[in-house]
Image: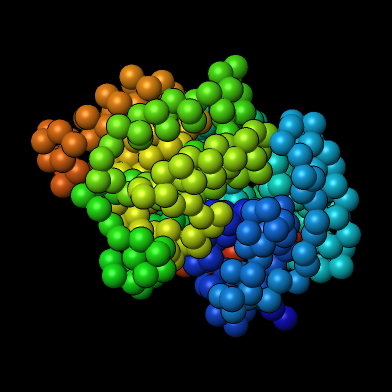
Amino acid sequence: MSKKICVFTGTRAEYGLLKPLMDEIKSDPELELQIIASGMHLSPEFGLTYKEIEKDGFMINEKIEMLLSSDTSVGVAKSIGLGIIGFSDALERLKPDIVVVLGDRFEALAFGVASYVLKIPIAHLYGGETTFGAVDEGFRHSLTKLSYLHFVSTEEYRRRVIQLGENPKRVFNVGALGIDNIKKMKLFEKEEIEARLGVKFKKKNFLITFHPVTLVNNPSEKQFIELLKALDEFEDVLLIFTKANADAEGRTINKLIDDYVEKNSHKAVTFTSLGQLLYLSTMRYVDAVVGNSSSGIIEAPSFKVGTINIGDRQEGRIMASSVINCKPSYESIKHAFNLLFSNEFQNTLCRVVNPYGDGNSAKKIVDILKQIDIESVKKEFYDL
């Protein structure tokens, strides 16, 4: 009998990372892939991205509504409660042998809580990382303690998971799934990208994603306005914005993006979701990934593309030499752009090495899921 592996996805970015793993599970005769989609995937406001999952040839077993149309922390907290209710029913119907959850978002936490209470073994991807500027920090470490199996992206993160009391025998350094996409996807060439985006690349080109910063006193709206002020100074530039996620203040940022693009249509375009293939293809041809998305930390170095990482949303992550960190202020962001185009930094880009693995993560994870024999989800605390 096939082992049933249920993969949870709640956002477009998370699905983009999970896709190579889902492909690997689906193609393995010893495994049965189940999919639960929720969160932003089911929201018209965020692009109904569950359709991308189905377009890629996957069958979604359960679609669970949980996302309130709210831009507040209270709305997020209530969404977590709705998610736990919906996921509990779905998991009872599907009865998976193992569930797979990636990352650190509130949707993932709700799924993890439901799975843990139902005594379903959780395989958690990418524990041990740190992002000091977001509530995701607490969600990630909470998921680590709920989970039985741990797949991490670097050896340092593996040590951190063990430090949290997890048995080293169940913590595996498999690298980052985002690198699998870069290695295995047939990316679009420049002309195809331009046709799909409806733009022409210019002398300078930036791919911009700025998500809410949920654990700082400086409002995300103010930080994003500082970025827009810095972008205003560029001539002969193409600014490609992708929308923010459903965290508190996400809708505020998206409104600022829409207003800015309307006033600067000669140099700026915006998309709710590009999809992983078009997003990575575009990344290959830009001068920098700008904002505070993890894609600038994990995927961009593989293209030898610079990253301007603004603020502390990603603070604590291991970063390649292609990442320029700056404060969320006009002067600091402007200085980062000047550094980006300096001869010294451009020479550094030629030699950058991505610290997140070799692009074979999906197969490593599937091999472990197939071999592992879980008789009980009972765990001991591993003392160092």
298 up-or-down from 336: above or below: below
Q: Quadrant of residue 28?
A: bottom right
* x and y, in percent, of residue 261 in the image: 47, 45
Q: How many marks?
A: 0
In the image, what residue occupies the spot 34% across and 65% down? 194
Q: Of all residues shown, which one is farthest toward the top?
A: 217
* x and y, in percent, of residue 243 in the image: 54, 47
Which quadrant is the C terminus positioned in? top right
In the image, what residue occupies the spot 46% across and 42% down? 263
- Residue 237 showing in the rendered view: yes
Q: Is residue 281 left or right of residue 126?
A: left
- Residue 300 showing in the rendered view: no
185 up-or-down from 11: above or below: below
Q: Front-most of 86 and 138?
A: 86
In the image, what residue occupies the spot 77% across and 64% down? 63
Q: Which colour style is shown?
A: rainbow
Q: Is residue 35 left or right of residue 318?
A: right
Which quadrant is the N terminus positioned in? bottom right
Q: Is residue 370 left or right of residue 275?
A: right
In the image, what residue occupies the spot 74% across and 31% down? 73
Q: Front-most of 375 and 245?
A: 245
* x and y, in percent, of residue 82 in the image: 85, 47
116 up-or-down from 99: above or below: above
* x and y, in percent, of residue 170 in the image: 58, 49
